[in-house]
């Protein structure tokens, strides 16, 4: 169940109806055994390491449960791009360092998922950028990634990020940027570039990041989750 604190009531809209479609579609999957909802990790083809940060989503789920009042299962679900099970996950995370390839059927499935109310967070783990952009262009040929201004609500949820994304890892030493794909006024995909949020979500001993950097990454991740559910 989505948490009691941190998710205020909102006017019922057509967008809410589309999101409810996902909730009702996954009810047999989650409620039969009274299981909490899971965050999803997107498994894709092309040779890229979609599995790069195995401890990231469990830590993000735990952080959201503690700070947003959510009730996520800390054991995330792995889901393939073309699978019908994609609709069981209102929030899906995608990461990696290299190639990304979507078949026509996979691109159509991902498009239907996002148009239907789902949310995709893409996190460039370094080296993913030249591959993920054309892959997503196949999903939404009519859309372009646009850089979101610092005033965008995604940076002003439970936690305030007045200057946009936190810088977790150096990479090419560029300023981190947050890009979005917007469908009919709704942000359906958030792409974090030159930030590496997922590495910041991992266990402390994995990358040995300072505690404050890890907390900044987790806070931004929590903002993404909260925004995805209440936009």
Image (cartoon, rainbow, N blue to C red):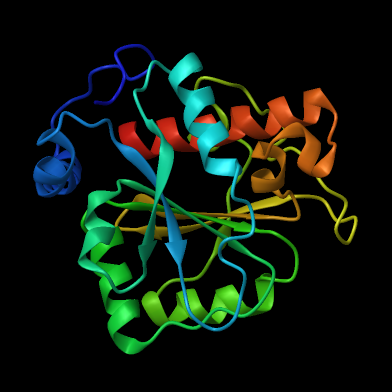
Which residue lies at the image location 32% right of the left edge and 88% below the top edge?
A: 104
User: Position of 80 compared to 108: left or right?
Assistant: right
Specify the farthest residue to the bottom. 104
Specify the farthest residue to the top. 5
Q: Quadrant of the C terminus?
A: top left
Tell me where residue 184 appears, x and y as whole percent: 29, 57
Q: Quadrant of the N terminus?
A: top left
Specify the farthest residue to the front. 33
Which residue lies at the image location 31% right of the left edge and 19% below the top edge?
A: 3
**Relative depth, front residue between 49 and 187:** 49
Which residue lies at the image location 16% right of the left edge and 45% below the top edge?
A: 29
Tell me where residue 167 appears, x and y as whole percent: 79, 42
**Relative depth, front residue between 211 and 6:** 211
Which residue lies at the image location 81% right of the left edge and 43% below the top edge?
A: 207
Up the image or down, 182 lies above or below 70; here it is below
Query: Quarter of the image holding residue 98?
Result: bottom right
User: Position of 218 compared to 115: left or right?
Assistant: right
Observer able to see residue 17: no
User: Position of 51 compared to 66: left or right?
Assistant: right
Query: Quarter of the image holding residue 130?
Result: bottom right
**Relative depth, front residue between 90 and 12:** 90
**Relative depth, front residue between 210 and 12:** 210
């Amino acid at each position: 169940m989505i948490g009691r604190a941190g998710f205020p009531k909102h006017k019922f809209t057509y967008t809410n109806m589309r999101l409810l479609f996902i909730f009702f579609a996954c009810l047999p999957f989650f409620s039969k055994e009274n299981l909490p909802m899971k965050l999803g990790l997107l498994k894709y083809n092309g040779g890229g390491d979609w599995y790069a940060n195995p401890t990231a989503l469990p830590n993000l789920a735990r952080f959201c449960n503690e700070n947003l009042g959510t009730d996520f299962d800390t054991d995330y679900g792995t889901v393939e791009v073309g699978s019908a099970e994609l609709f069981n996950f209102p929030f899906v995370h995608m990461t990696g360092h290299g190639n990304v390839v979507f078949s026509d059927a996979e691109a159509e499935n991902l498009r239907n998922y996002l148009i239907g109310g789902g949310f995709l967070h893409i996190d460039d783990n370094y080296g993913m950028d030249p591959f993920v952009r054309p892959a997503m262009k196949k999903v939404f040929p009519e859309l372009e990634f646009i850089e979101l201004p610092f005033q965008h609500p995604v940076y002003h949820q439970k936690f305030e990020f007045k200057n946009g994304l936190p810088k977790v890892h150096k990479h090419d030493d560029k300023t981190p940027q947050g890009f979005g794909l917007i469908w009919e006024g709704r942000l359906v995909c958030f792409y974090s570039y030159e930030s590496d949020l997922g590495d910041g979500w991992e266990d402390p001993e994995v990358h040995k990041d300072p505690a404050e950097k890890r907390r900044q990454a987790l806070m931004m991740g929590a903002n993404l989750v909260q925004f995805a559910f209440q936009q």
